[in-house]
């Protein structure tokens, strides 16, 4: 069956020969059956309309089309361009298509019965080849991150992860270097070694280098815990299968590097991805263990489940040793961030507070929403240790996302601009609507690319 998409602001826009139905909210859709074709109608009435609303419509259009087994969908962008005067034609077309492509994602690798049905989209009137290409590149990068997050823990060990990186960056300008377990300490990754040594799946660090521009490198650091059982401080209760996605930060970094490389964006970029499995066992690290970092700083392990900050600290030091003056880290770091912000918006911290609202704007633009969080200096005292310079566990049950960020700040030098994103609450979509479905959201890919582009300006 074929269908045309009608973007309608209100019911009165409907062609006369179509039956009228109640049309209540933005994004609501109806399929009207005509004689030879159907009309897929999407409502667009809304007060403040954004680029994310356009992506939402693109996603919704595809899902409705596929639900109704519509083979060919014809889209005339003119109506949308006429209705949404606050956005440019380019913004409208790219973002609608991005939503359409993202909505086509499903993770069916391990299912015998795959749902192969796909609707095709054709654009009427004008050719938008370049915009189509941009939208597809963006969606593919996000889908790489979704794929990585959706893999079961036994299908994404540090070793398998590093092999996947080779295939993702094959035929690109991105160079990959893997630091194996036996070389970790020599390279300065003392905490990655310590956290990872309890698992039979040995820890590693993956470095991605995209040297495609001038100046000191921008460093992206992503938490790559391919499974987090909590270690000796074992997690109990809740859905601990979720912890296969404790590498969501690293997936965001991989997707962002892929996106920037595919766009041939002019930037000198390094990505540092610590890969570990955090489990308990005879060789696992223990509460009270001491870690001495590359800069001499000592940390007492108060809790083996606060492993993310330990391995990120190594990576942040390494980034500075590589000459980076701009560091962005992203991690599924704390359960607390979800209590603070709910499940739609991640937290962003920065050692230059004046940048926080601009960062929030980049979140809105990208569809990966973030909200400013404070680095409350007084709370540093909650990380004091009797034996070491720092404890990885706060002595307070409150403000866990803030104390985790403060822990990291101890490893950032004064010359460095540092952004920290805690995305523990957004690694899955908060609702399966628009271009989101089951599984991971792909959060952070477009946001990181946006931040890198902003830093280069
Ligand atoms: N990976 C978790 C954080 C997390 C929680 C991610 C929920 C996704 C969903 C992290 O390693 C962790 O366990 N953090 C602890 C820290 C605590 C022990 C100080 C937490 O947030 O409870
Ligand atoms: Zn943990
Ligand atoms: Zn974790």
Image: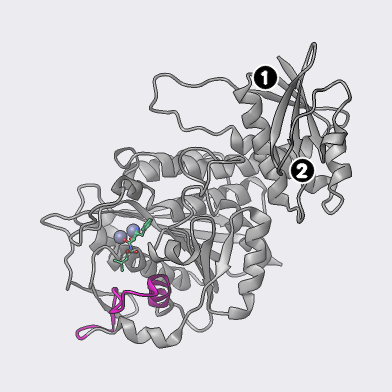
Residue 126 percent location from the top left of the image: 87, 32
Residue 334 appearing in the image: no
Quarter containing ligand 2? bottom left
Mark 1 crowdedness (10 Å alpha carbons): few <14, some 14-19, many ≥20: many
> Would you say the beta carbon of the disc 2 residue lies within 8 angstroms of ligand 1?
no
Horizontal side, residue 190 vs residue 37: left or right? left
Q: Which residue is under mark 1?
A: 70
Count the marks.
2
Mark 2 crowdedness (10 Å alpha carbons): few <14, some 14-19, many ≥20: many
Tell me which segment is drawn in magenta: 386-408
Which circle, 1 or 2, is nearer the viewer? 2
Instruction: Give the residue at x 18% y 69%.
Output: 287
Is the residue 179 above or below the residue 24 in the image?
A: below
Q: Nearer the viewer, residue 191 or 398?
A: 398
Q: Nearer the viewer, residue 186 or 285?
A: 285
376 inside magenta stretch: no
Residue 117 percent location from the top left of the image: 57, 20
Horizontal side, residue 418 vs residue 98: left or right? left
Residue positioned most to the top? 36
Residue 252 appearing in the image: yes
Instruction: Give the residue at x 29% y 59%.
Output: 183
Is the residue 366 above or below the residue 62 in the image?
A: below
393 inside magenta stretch: yes
Q: Which residue is under mark 2?
A: 44
Q: Quadrant of the C terminus?
A: bottom right
Q: CA distance from mark 1 to mark 2?
A: 21 Å
Q: Quadrant of the N terminus?
A: top right
The kind of secondary structure element at disc 2 is: loop
Specify which label sits upstream in the sequence, 1 or 2.
Answer: 2
Is the residue 325 above or below the residue 199 in the image?
A: below
Q: Identify the colour scheme used.
A: one colour
Horizontal side, residue 25 vs residue 346: left or right? right
């Amino acid at each position: 069956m074929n269908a045309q998409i009608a973007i309608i602001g209100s019911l009165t826009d409907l062609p006369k020969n179509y039956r009228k139905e109640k049309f209540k909210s933005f994004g609501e859709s109806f399929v009207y059956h005509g004689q030879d074709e159907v009309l897929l109608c999407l409502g667009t009435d809304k007060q403040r309309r954004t680029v994310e609303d356009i992506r939402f419509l693109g996603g919704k259009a595809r899902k409705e089309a596929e639900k109704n087994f519509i083979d060919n969908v014809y889209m005339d962008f003119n109506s949308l361009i006429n209705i949404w005067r606050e956005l440019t034609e380019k913004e409208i077309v790219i973002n609608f298509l991005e939503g359409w492509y993202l909505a086509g994602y499903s993770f069916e690798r391990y299912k015998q019965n795959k749902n192969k049905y796909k609707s095709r989209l054709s654009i009427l009137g004008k050719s938008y080849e370049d915009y189509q290409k941009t939208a597809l590149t963006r969606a593919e990068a996000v889908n790489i991150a979704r794929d990585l997050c959706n893999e079961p823990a036994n299908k994404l060990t540090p070793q398998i992860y590093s092999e996947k990186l080779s295939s993702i960056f094959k035929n690109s300008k991105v160079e990959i270097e893997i630091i194996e377990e036996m070389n970790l300490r020599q390279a300065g990754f003392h905490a990655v070694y310590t956290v990872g040594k309890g698992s039979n799946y040995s820890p590693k660090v993956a470095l991605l280098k995209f040297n495609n521009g001038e100046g000191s490198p921008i460093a992206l650091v992503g938490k790559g815990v391919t499974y987090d059982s909590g270690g000796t401080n074992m997690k109990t209760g809740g859905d601990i299968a979720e912890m296969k996605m404790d590498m969501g930060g690293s997936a965001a970094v991989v997707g962002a590097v892929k996106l920037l490389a595919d766009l041939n964006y002019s930037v000198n970029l390094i990505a540092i991805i610590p890969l570990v499995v955090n489990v308990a066992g005879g060789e696992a690290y223990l509460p009270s263990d001491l870690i001495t970092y590359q800069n001499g700083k000592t940390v007492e392990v108060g809790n083996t489940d606060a492993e993310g900050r330990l391995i990120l600290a190594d990576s942040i030091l390494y980034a500075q040793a590589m000459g980076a003056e701009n560091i962005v880290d992203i991690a599924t770091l704390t359960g607390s961030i979800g209590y603070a912000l709910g499940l739609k918006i991640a937290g962003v911290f920065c050692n230059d507070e004046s940048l926080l609202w601009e960062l929030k704007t980049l979140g809105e633009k990208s569809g990966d929403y973030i909200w400013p969080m404070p680095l409350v200096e007084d709370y540093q005292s909650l990380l004091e240790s009797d034996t070491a310079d720092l404890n990885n566990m706060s002595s307070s049950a409150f403000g866990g996302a803030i104390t985790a960020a403060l822990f990291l700040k101890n490893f950032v030098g004064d010359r460095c601009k540092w952004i920290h994103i805690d995305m523990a609450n957004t690694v899955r979509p908060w609702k399966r609507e628009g271009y989101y479905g089951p599984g991971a959201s792909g959060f952070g890919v477009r946001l990181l690319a946006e931040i890198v582009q902003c830093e280069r300006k």
